[in-house]
Image (tube, helix red, strand yellow):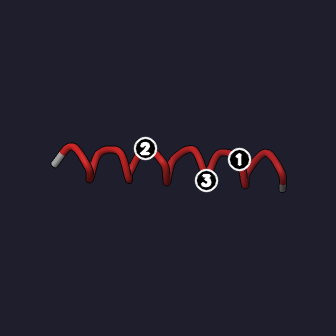
């Protein structure tokens, strides 16, 4: 379960970076 939370967090960070770059 912890791994899933980490993956979700990574997804969130990636999405934020893409939003900033866009």
Q: Which residue lies furthest to the right in this view?
A: 22
Q: Are marks 3 and 2 in contact (CB under 8 Å)?
A: no
Q: What element carries label 1?
A: helix
9 relative position to 15: left or right: left
Q: Nearer the viewer, mark 3 or mark 2?
A: 2
Residue tagged 1: 17
| Label 1 CA crowd tier, 10 Å (few <14, some 14–19, many 20+) | few
Q: Is mark 2 on a helix, strand or loop?
A: helix
- Would you name the residue on which mark 2 appears? 9
Residue 17 percent coordinates (x, y): 71, 47
Which residue: 72% across, 55% down? 18
Q: Are the two marked residues, 1 and 3, in contact with CB atoms closer than 8 angstroms?
A: yes
Question: Which residue carries the number 3 mark?
Answer: 15
Of the image marks 1 and 2, the number of the one nearer the N terminus: 2
Q: Quadrant of residue 13?
A: top right
At a point 38% along the width and 51% down the height, the residue shown is 8
Q: In the image, is 8 to the left or to the right of 18?
A: left
Q: How far apart are marks 3 and 2 (CA)?
A: 10 Å
Query: Which residue occupies 43% across, 44% down?
Result: 9
Whole-angstrom CA distance, mark 1 to mark 3, is 5 Å
Measure the C-alpha gap from mark 1 to mark 2: 12 Å
Total number of numbered labels? 3
Q: Are marks 1 and 2 in contact (CB under 8 Å)?
A: no
Which residue lies most toward the left here?
A: 1
């Amino acid at each position: 379960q912890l791994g899933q939370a980490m993956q979700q967090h990574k997804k969130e960070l990636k999405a934020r970076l893409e939003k900033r770059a866009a």
